[in-house]
Structure formats: structure tokens, C-alpha cells
Image (cartoon, rainbow, N blue to C red):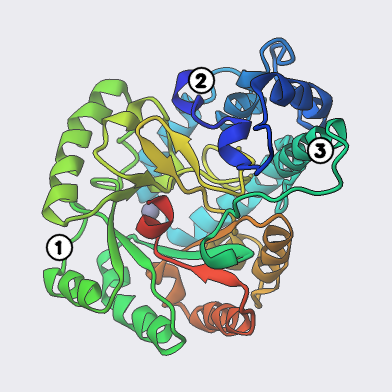
Amino acid sequence: MLDLYAANTLAAFWHLLLDPPVSSTEWTEAIRAAVSILPPVDRPIAGDSAEVAPLVLSEAHMGPNRWQLGWGTQLYYEVKPLFPRRLNIALRQRYRQLQERRFPLAWPVEDRYARFLYSCAAHLLRQRNLDLASFVGFWPEGHRFALVLTHDVERGSGQAFVRTVVDLEERLGYRSAFNFVPERYPIDHGLLADLRRRGFEIDVHGLKHDGTLFGSKQAFDRQARRINQYLREWDAVGFRAPYMHRNPRWQQALRVEYDLSFFDTDPYEPMPGGTMSMWPFFLGHFVELPYTLAQDHTLMAILGERTPRLWLDKVDALERWQGMALLNTHPDYLLEPGRLAIYGAFLEAMKERRNYWHALPRDVAR
Ligand SMILES: [Zn+2]
């Protein structure tokens, strides 16, 4: 599994402009000096320091069998459609306390991987008796951080609300990606064409959104073939898995440039965990763009927030580390009373900040 993450070396992260260039021995020493910042995993990691970043990004801190869906989770998706919606939300809120207690990462800000990366660079400079060094910035045009907006369109009612969300974003000067489910509701191809014309991006969000995609490797491969057809048909290059179910190895079967199914830290998903990365990273043949802001459903339904305060606080932390603010909201949730206003307030507040690169996911990946 770690081979999928092998491209994420310290030298690939920090393009330090030093003469002579940083040697791999220097990086190894720096990693050894900083590794204690990271949470423990169930295997020694100091032995081969090249493995440290891959271990973090592969969520090794979440224990073995990380990518297996528990039988309880699978059962939940089979019986969930039978429950009334109110009961589902009540169950989620009860389950929330259990999830928060068990969760080994920090939330909403998990900055240990960021501190590790910065400590490695600091250690290296100390070894060379330097106070500062130039490096190639993470974002184009000297921007301090990045802002990426994405949306999963869950149902037909959400699809019918997409234009309202688009109008709001367009009015404020934003563009975003909308991820549609190919075989759950009739796709409005006129809407897709309209979105493309207006500078928005289209992605694929699962196949049927029924919880079966990651049931087995065979099930995944079978559905992946159809997903790849839709990617081609829609001229799409990005994918996000329903329910943030994920498997780095299986997902290599998808013909995408980037994926959006992972996140830096999130205790509230059916597969809680996190890559701890506030930046895009290489995952096999594609780029992973982890979301780093709480999902709208978490913020508004599970936590009951009535303002975008939590999002803006997290943006502050991401700016400090020069990371990527990536948000996933759902037209299906935003159409409920009061919710679009919270999203609008977030966008308005972000308009006041000028020091970030606002881009579509495909541009970030490229
Ligand atoms: Zn979804």
C-alpha cells in the first residue's frame, strides 16, 4: 500500500533553493529529528524515514484493516433507507458522541503533520547554520493559501437547486465543481452544459450512491468500469466516493486526474480518520485533494452551527500553514431553510481576504 504514496517525499514537498541541493541523508536526519511530533503507529517508523510521509498519508495511525468497511457500517446502509429521516438524524447525533470519544486525531485542526513538515525544514536549516532559505511557494503567484469549492449533488431535488447555488457563487466571483451521481436520478444534461459554459467543473460522485461501491473488490471493479464511461462521456477528470468510503488501492482503477474522497481529519464520517494533510498529495496515478473544512451536513445538522465561524477559524489555521481550504457542500442540504445563508456568509467573508488562490480542483491537481 505504501508504494502508492512513495512520491510524497520531503524533497517533493519542500523545494528548497539551497546550494548545494539537499541530500537524501540530510532529509533522513531531519525526519528522524522531527518524527516524534507524529502520532504513533503500530510499527516502528524511525527505521526507514522515507516511509514516514507515506505512513501518515495512508492513515496508518488509524490501525490495521483501515480500508475495510465494518459489517455494522454495511448493515447500516442496507437498513438506512427504511428509517424515517428524523430517526436517521437522531441516530447520527447519538453516534456522534461515540465517534468523538474514540477518535485519535484532533479536530477541526489536526496540525501534527504540518508541524512535522515544517520542523524537518527547520532542522535542516539549523544543520546548515542558516536562519532562512528561499523555497518554491506551494501556490501560484505567491498566494498564501488556496480555496477550492466542491459540491456533491445527492438527489434530484439537490440537482434542481444547483442553479441557485451557482448564481450565488457567480455573483460573488467564485467557481466550483459539482459532482453528480450518474445512476441515481435522471441527469439534467442541459444543466451540465450550462455549468461548463459558466466556468464550473463537473465530476462524478459514485455510481448509484447506495453504499455498495466498496462492498468488495469485484463490486468496485464492476462499478468502476461504468464510472469510467461516465467520466469520458461527461469529459470529467475528478471523482468523489459516496459516504467518503475509500480504498487507495481499489481506486487506482478509476481513470481520473484527481480524487476528492479523502480528508485531513473528520470524526463524523462512516470511515472516520484522516490523512492529516492540508495539501494535495500523490496517490498512485492521480492527485488526492483532501477536503479540509467540515462538510455542511456536519456543521449545520450534526453540530447545529448557525454561522460559518467554524469554517473561517479553520481557514485561519490553513492560512498559517499555507495549506488548501477545500470545502464540500451539498445543494440537497443548502436548500433547507437558513442554510444557503450560512454558505453565503462564508463566501462573503472570504471575499474580504485577498491573499489566496481560488481555483477549480482540476487546476489545483494539474
Ligand atoms: Zn454523496
Q: What residue appears at the point 27 percent right and 70 percent down from the top-left corner?
A: 159
Ligand 1 within 8 A of label 3's CB?
no
Q: Secondary structure at mark 1?
A: loop
Observer-side mark, 3 or 2, equals 3
Q: CA–CA distance between discs 3 and 1? A: 57 Å
- Place of residue 113 in the rendered image (x, y in percent of width and height, measured from the top left): 70, 39
**Residue under numbered circle 3:** 125
Observer-side mark, 3 or 1, equals 3
Q: What residue appears at the point 63 percent right and 54 percent down from the top-left corner?
A: 93
**Residue under numbered circle 2:** 2
Q: Is residue 61 left or right of residue 75?
A: right
Tell which circle, 2 or 1, labels the residue nearer the N-terminal end: 2
Q: Is residue 326 left or right of residue 144?
A: left
Q: Which residue is at the front of the view, 249 or 86?
A: 249
Query: At label 3, which amino acid type do we have?
Result: Leu
**Residue under numbered circle 1:** 186
Dividing the picture into quadrants, the one containing residue 198 is: bottom left
Query: At label 1, which amino acid type do we have?
Result: Pro
